[in-house]
Structure formats: C-alpha cells, structure tokens
Amino acid sequence: MGNLSVGSKRIITLLTDFGDQDYFVGAMKGVILSINPEANVVDLTHDISPQDIETAAFNLFCCYQSFPSGTIHVAVVDPGVGSDRKPIAIECAQQFLVGPDNGLFSWICDREKDWQAVQLTNSKFFHQPVSRTFHGRDIFAPIAAELSKGLAINELGEPVGDIVRLDSLEPKRVDDRTIEGRVIHIDRFGNCITNFRPADLSAHGDASWKLTIGGQEISSFLEFFAEGEEGDIFCIVGSAGFLEIAARNRSAAQILNLRRGQSLHLVSAPLSRIRARLD
C-alpha cells in the first residue's frame, strides 16, 4: 500500500442508517472528538433506509474518490451487530474504510484491487464498555479517531484474507449482441441507476443500443435531463458513471414500476434514435 501522510486534522466521514432523530450520530462524533479534537468529521448521509447495505455501499462507492488521501470512511449499516460478523478496517486507495464486514466495502475493493484488511480485535482502542448493539460508537468511531492520529492499521488486529462481498457490479455478456445487467440503485428523483457503463455502449463501435426491461424497450440515449420531453423515458450517463433510466421531471421508477435488483438487457440495434414514449 502507498504511504499516507500523518496529520491529526484528517477527515473522517460518517455514513449510517441512524437518521437524525436519535442520539446515535452525536454519540459517534463525541467519541471521535474526545480522542482527536482536531478531526474533521463530515456527514455523508444518515438517511440510508434501515439495514439497507446495498444502498449504503452504492453511496460510499460513488463518493469516496472525491475525498483526499488519508480520509477515513466510517460506514455503519449493521443488521448483524453483536453477532459473529467481523468488525474490520481496510486500507485502500490511499484511504481507510471502517465498519462491519457485511459487503459495505466490497465494490470499492473490487474496483481498486489493491487493499488490505484487518479484523478489529485490539480492544484497547475501543470505547468501553462495548455495547453489543452499538459498535458504531464503541468500536468503529474510536478506531477511526485513532487512525486519524496516525495509528497503523496493522496495530488494530489480525489480517483478514477476504471480505464479505455483494454481487459484482460487472454486467454479464449473454451473446455477441446482448449484455445482461440490473438496477443497482434508485435515487430520490426516481432515476434508476444500472450497472452498465459507457464502455459497454462502445463495445460495438458505432452500433446503437436499446435497453430492454421486461416487454419495454428504451432506445433514446440523451446527454442531459433537459434534452428530454415531458413523458419521455430515456437513458443517460449519470454523475456516478453508470447508465441511468430517467424521465424528465418525473420518476422513471414509478412510471416503469422498477425496483432495485431488477434484470435488464442492453441489446445492440441498427443505428436509430427512437424515443420510448409512455403515457
């Protein structure tokens, strides 16, 4: 792994499903700042739906590269808290990832390839006593604070050979003309993010594509939302770098009754530009 600069003002990000009605996030921040008062704590989001690991993984995957070297990302969406699931820390992409070993970090590790992980077993760095229901406060927050002060990851516990993994983000080639993918996220606007990337669209040179979802075909590929017309369903490459299904000023998810995990296909088609208009 590369060398990380040491400094007590390192950024610590927090991503949880805790919401903002209870004391949970405040308690985590209190523990962090008690250990390192100079830490710069940044909230990514605390509005992840309860126990929704995939949405948490997607949000972290889409924003960790926006942060500088040395950032520590704490992600706590942890339906297995208190069980035999491992608490882990990962050094990856010149940053650190801290949280439960339940798939939260697998897409980042898949992308970056070069990473090392440890199971958090060195209890001298924990906030005592350790609750069986709140590892965010008692394990992950203090570990992040210690890392922000320059603690080496190998002092936290024993190496982990592999981590729990979510289904890969890589689409599957069905045949020469067809690629199978899925909806991996639906944002608050109802845009449906797929696991197709621009490289998949260029796989056949100048060939055009249509996206099929059940019996519905979408052949309109636009560059920005305002290019579409009211009522049109179209595809667009979104800011996360994935192909999205969208509708101007409407929820594509509601119009098409789509859900996360739903299968879809990219099929190469004759050069054409046909809009799929829905009532």
Image (cartoon, rainbow, N blue to C red):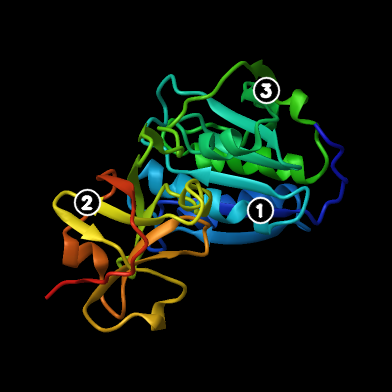
Q: Secondary structure at mark 2?
A: strand
* Mark sitting on residue 88: none
In the rendered image, which quarter is residue 68 located in? bottom right
* Mark sitting on residue 122: 3
Q: Amino acid at mark 1?
A: Gln
Examine the rendered structure and indicate whether residue 145 appears above or below residue 117.
below
Disc 1 designates what residue? 65
- CA gap between label 2 and label 1 equals 31 Å
Q: How many marks?
A: 3
Position of 109 compared to 170: left or right? right
Return the residue nearer the eye: 2 or 267.
267
In the rendered image, which quarter is residue 142 located in? top right
Q: Secondary structure at mark 1?
A: helix
Examine the rendered structure and indicate whether residue 255 appears above or below residue 248.
above
* Mark sitting on residue 213: 2
Residue drawn at (66%, 59%), measured in percent from left and top? 66
Give the image location of residue 64, x and y in percent.
62, 52
Examine the rendered structure and indicate whether residue 110 appears above or below residue 95.
above
Examine the rendered structure and indicate whether residue 210 appears above or below residue 53.
below
